[in-house]
Image (spheres, rainbow, N blue to C red):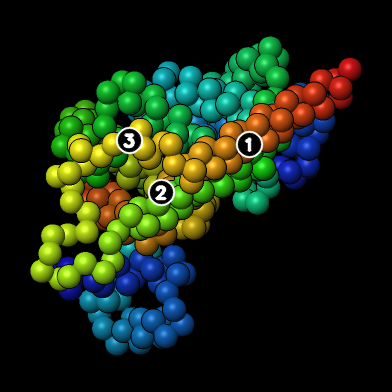
Amino acid sequence: MNQEQNIEQRLWAYIDGISSSEENTSIEKMLQGNLEWKNKYHELLDVHDMMKAAELEQPSMRFTKNVMEQITQLHIAPATRNYINKKIIWGITGFFLTLILVFLIYGFAQVEWNSPSDSKPAIDLSRLSEVDYSKIFNNTFVNVFMMVNVLLGLVLLDRVLANKRKKFQNQG
Amino acid sequence: MSTGLGDNEIISRVLRGEQNAYAELVNRYQAYVFTLTLRMIKSREDAEEVAQDVFVKAYRSLADFRGDSKFSTWLYTIVNTTCITFLRKKKLDVHSLDNEKVFEVADNKDSGFRANLIEQKSRINMVNEAITMLSPDDAEIITLFYKAEQNLEEISKILRLETNTVKVRLHRARTRLKEKMEKNFSEEVKNIY
């Protein structure tokens, strides 16, 4: 950034009133003693005043009427906070966190931590294709995990249906 | 006819079912919304259509206005997204500050405006015309800051940018506006300085 740009930037911040009090004092000092700063300040202040004085554009005379005609056929949509149930969002978050946690625990449980340093890495990725997945999904651990997920799913479904029932009763 | 009621009070009335009260909000903000859309879209007819669309969208989503910011800030967020959607549909890139096409459009406009320079312009007209020569991004930020009276934090909410980014963009926009005025209205600018 060259010196002129720097002066401009500092002066704009001063004009907008967003400089710190120390910066204000320093700029005021410069404005009193430095002609370049003083001229630039007046130049920017003129632009600032002109921009403030710029007029708003006016739409056509029928503008409000047109909008009101369009909204007569419309209804205000219910607030999103009313139909997005936070409990459901927390339920979904809980589900995914549990999923990640279980996979992490399972993954770490498979690692052979005591293997000597010169041996092959604990997880040999090249052997992934040799894994017998039928054994994994017969595992009690995985079965329990799946059961928890099914339960969570049923709880979520129950909540959704309960909300719908409540809404229906209120309407009735 | 102005009711003198605050924005939030009018919104409560509209939400209670007094649809006609919404006309007061439209009257109050139509010039601001129209100016903003015109700064971004340039064509008066399209800008008016988009501005009407903004008020219709705002009406539909009025229940979502929580009152934790000014109504105008919330409304200008809708202006911004509606204009961007409109411009995207028209396949214009509004995001890049250095978009050559935008400046090409603006420069082409320059030549048209120069022809009208024979007649003396008032300072206000000069600024308004200089603003129309800017890119939509620059024109929007200047209009939000000077005409819609939004502070840097509010503009950062509307444009979904960091406050510091807004500060830099505003500075750049003002520099470009000053350059446009010096280039196209050199005689008038001389009289001012």
Circle nearer the viewer, 3 or 1: 3
Sequence-first tag of 3 and 1: 3
Do dots 3 and 1 share one subunit? yes
Which residue type carries mark 3? Tyr
Which residue type carries mark 2? Phe
Residue placed most toward the observer, A114 or A80: A114
Residue placed most toward the observer, B53 or A118: A118
Which residue is labeled 1 in the image?
A151
Going 67% across and 42% down the picture, which residue do you hit?
A: A87
> In the rendered structure, the residue with mark 3 lies on which chain?
A
Residue A21 is at least partly visible in this image: yes
Do dots 3 and 2 share one subunit? yes
> In the rendered structure, the residue with mark 2 lies on which chain?
A
Going 35% across and 81% down the picture, which residue do you hit?
A: A27
> From the viewer's perspective, is B83 left or right of A92?
left
Going 33% across and 42% down the picture, which residue do you hit?
A: B137
Going 51% across and 53% down the picture, which residue do you hit?
A: B154
Residue furthest out toward the right: A172
Sequence-first tag of 3 and 2: 2
Which residue is labeled 2 in the image?
A103
> From the viewer's perspective, is B47 left or right of B189?
right
What is the secondary structure assignment of the residue under circle 3?
helix
What's the distance in space between the residues labelled 1 and 2, CA to CA? Answer: 18 Å
Q: Residues within 10 Å of mark 2 (few under 14, many from 20)?
A: few
Residue furthest out toward the left: A118
What's the distance in space between the residues labelled 3 and 2, CA to CA? Answer: 14 Å
Which residue is labeled 3 in the image?
A133
What is the secondary structure assignment of the residue under circle 2?
helix
